[in-house]
Amino acid sequence: MPSKTYIQSLNSGDFRLSIRCEIVSWIVYLSRNFDSYLSYLAINYMDRFLSVHSKLDNKPWILKLVAIACISIALKMRKTEFSVSDLMQDGGFIFDSVTIGRIEMLILGALEWRMRSANPFCFVNYFISFFKFNDKPSIQALKNRATEIIFKAQHDIKLLEFKPSVISASALLCSVSELFPIQFPSFRNAICSCSYVNKEDLLQCYDLIQDVAMDGYDSVMAVAASSSCTPANVLDLHCFSSSISGSQSNQMAETENNAGQNQKHMESKD
């Protein structure tokens, strides 16, 4: 995790906040052709590096160089084949491999070579075991939604102060409240009773992460609710969509985005 001093400085709105925003933008842009886990890992390295290397020069070429170095390290940790040119196709600043390598060494030294970051994804399977589901589609739906929330949460600096395990548990709580609201109280009580989780931190993180989770989600649910034949809750929506398509997909989250299309398909069958 980043240092508490770093997190406090971001919350106070000092110059490091603008530096972080700029580097995050570069990381997201330059890693757009790779999977989302790559950018998540690179941003984790960046936050931990900035928390140690506090006096980074706020020059555009330096910020981009740090972003490229973090992505490069993340690619190597994920054992993904790439070339330096893959990261510099935008026509901006161009750096040679030696320069990038020097910054990589600077970052590795600042992080004391501790690159196997414990992130929220490491704890999803553990916390999901508290929810006694036997059917794989329901479990997969929870994982998909929790994963989406975790990705979105990384950009909110308020959540940097919480441990990865707490963020993971909070994201799953949000997923349950959206997908299986009836079972939410029992799942919340089970998570809160876990001896490894600080209940106060969990509830505080859950309140914050709810705002992140619902950003853009309300509009999706509004579209689904606008149809007279659309089921009243997301669990029914999943069953409704499955009965139409007959597919074996476990991606319940996709049914929310396709609710309008499914409605038209049902009407055409009628």
Image (tube, rainbow, N blue to C red):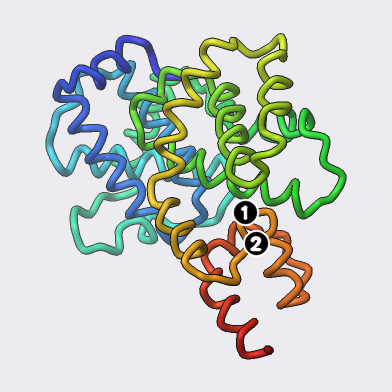
Where 200 falls versus 182 (above or below)? above
Q: Taking 58 as reference, is 167 left or right?
A: right
Residue at the outermost right position: 134
Q: How dense is the environment of label 2, judged by Cα within 10 Å: few (below 14), some, or many (20 and up)? A: many
Q: Which residue is mark 2?
A: 237
Q: Quadrant of residue 229?
A: bottom right
Q: Looking at the image, which residue is at 50% across and 26% down?
A: 206
Q: Is residue 145 left or right of residue 248?
A: left
The answer to which quarter of the image holds residue 249 is: bottom right
Q: Amino acid at mark 2?
A: Leu
Residue placed at 36% from the left, 60% from the top? 85
Residue 63 or residue 164, whichever sits in front: 164
Q: Nearer the viewer, residue 237 or 141?
A: 237
Q: Is residue 29 shown left or right of residue 208?
A: left
Cα–Cα span, label 2 and label 1: 6 Å
Q: Circle 1 sits in a helix, a strand or a loop, which is it?
A: loop
Q: Are marks 2 and 1 in contact (CB under 8 Å)?
A: yes
Dot 1 amino acid type: Asn
Which residue is drawn at the image coordinates 53% and 43% (left, top)? 76
Sort mark 1 into few (<14), some (14-19) or many (20+) by Cα contacts within 10 Å. some
In front of the other: 136 or 34: 136
Q: What mark, if any, has residue 19 been given in the picture?
A: none
Instruction: Identify the secondary structure beneath mark 2.
Output: helix
The spot of residue 218 in percent (x, y) is: 42, 51
Residue 9, percent across and down? Answer: 24, 16
Q: Is residue 172 above or below residue 158?
A: below
Residue 119 x %, y % = 56, 30
Quadrant, the C terminus: bottom right
Q: Name the residue furthest front.
A: 228
Residue 7: x, y in percent?
A: 32, 17
Per the image, the residue denoted by label 1 is 233
Residue pictured at 38% horizontal, 54% vertical: 84
